[in-house]
């Protein structure tokens, strides 16, 4: 597995994977450094129901998991729909507090568009949060396809989201590159049998 510690130029990716016609990005921790924001939002939800957790522990424990999976693992005392509404509200507030798209990532997206590569975003985040973030950072036009937690019956680490994305964009596994950061996302990428790399370019302070 290729591990990238800095956001690459398109030429670097094409040198490694010359047959690709599409690139599929994970969102949190890959496209944007937002794993921290999700963990902070989760901390606030848990605080409301009397559970005190460190956000760094939450980020480590649930990196790459959908909110539905987090709710299930925590055996939360509040119903899933209420949990999701609270988490989304806190998360959006945190995400709106800063600019999140790095210059190097915008340059990579620009290069992909100019090279006529197909781009897809495949995330386990909620549609409401995803849509807000893509619009806020002005990157929606780069992606021909956006799949969120609600768009597939199974989520990462199952490969279904990536297989559905490849089918929707009309590309084979040998024409597809997946960029992921979390264990769940990397497992999904590997099971899809597409090319994939691990993104390790965002450090959390």
Image: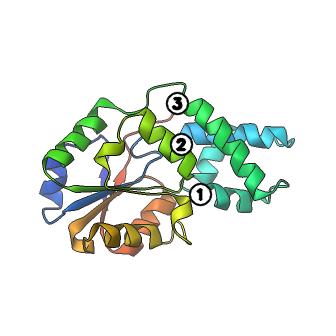
Check whether the beta carbons of the residues at disc 2 and disc 1 lie within 8 A of each other. no
Give the alpha-carbon distance from disc 3 to disc 2, as whole Å.
Answer: 11 Å
Q: What residue is pinned by disc 2?
A: 35
Q: Residue at x 56, y 61 (%)?
A: 150
Q: As displayed, is residue 86 above or below residue 94?
A: below
Give the alpha-carbon distance from disc 1 to disc 3, as whole Å.
Answer: 23 Å
- Residue 118 at what x, y percent from top left? 24, 57
**Mark positioned earlier in the residue sequence (3 or 2):** 2
103 to the left or right of 70:
left
Tag 1 secondary structure: loop
Q: Nearer the viewer, residue 161 or 185?
A: 161
Q: Is residue 40 visible?
A: no
Count the marks: how many? 3
109 to the left or right of 28:
left
Tag 3 secondary structure: loop
Say few, some or many: other residues with alpha carbon within 10 Å of mark 1 (under 14 / 14 to 19 / 20 or more). Answer: many
Which is more foreground, mark 3 or mark 2?
2
**Mark positioned earlier in the residue sequence (2 or 1):** 2
Q: As displayed, is residue 176 above or below residue 44?
A: below
Q: Nearer the viewer, residue 122 or 196?
A: 122
Could you say which disc has been placed on residue 131 in the image?
A: none
Q: Residue at x 40, y 46 (%)?
A: 30
Image quadrant containing the N terminus: bottom left
Check whether the beta carbons of the residues at disc 3 and disc 2 lie within 8 A of each other. no
Q: What residue is pinned by disc 1?
A: 66
Q: What residue is pinned by disc 3?
A: 205
54 to the left or right of 161:
right
**Mark positioned earlier in the residue sequence (1 or 3):** 1
Give the alpha-carbon distance from disc 2 to disc 1, as whole Å.
Answer: 12 Å
Q: Is residue 76 visible?
A: yes
Which is more foreground, mark 1 or mark 3?
1
Tag 2 secondary structure: helix
């Amino acid at each position: 597995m290729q591990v990238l510690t800095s956001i690459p130029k398109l030429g670097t990716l094409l040198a490694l994977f010359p047959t690709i016609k599409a690139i599929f990005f994970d969102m949190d921790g890959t496209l944007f450094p937002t794993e921290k924001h999700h963990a902070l939002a989760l901390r606030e939800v848990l605080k409301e129901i009397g559970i005190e957790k460190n956000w760094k522990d939450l980020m480590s424990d649930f990196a790459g998991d959908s909110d539905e999976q987090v709710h299930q693992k925590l055996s939360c005392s509040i119903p899933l729909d209420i949990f999701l509404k609270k988490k989304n509200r806190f998360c959006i507030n945190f995400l709106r507090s800063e600019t999140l798209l790095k210059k190097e990532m915008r340059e990579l997206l620009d290069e992909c568009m100019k090279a006529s590569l197909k781009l897809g975003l495949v995330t386990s985040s909620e549609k409401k949060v995803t849509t807000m973030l893509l619009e806020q950072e002005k990157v929606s036009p780069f992606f021909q396809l956006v799949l969120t937690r609600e768009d597939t019956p199974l989520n990462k680490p199952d490969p279904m989201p990536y297989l559905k994305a490849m089918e929707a964009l009309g590309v084979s596994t040998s024409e597809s590159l997946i960029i992921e950061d979390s264990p769940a996302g990397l497992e999904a990428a590997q099971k899809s049998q597409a090319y994939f790399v691990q993104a390790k370019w965002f450090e959390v302070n």
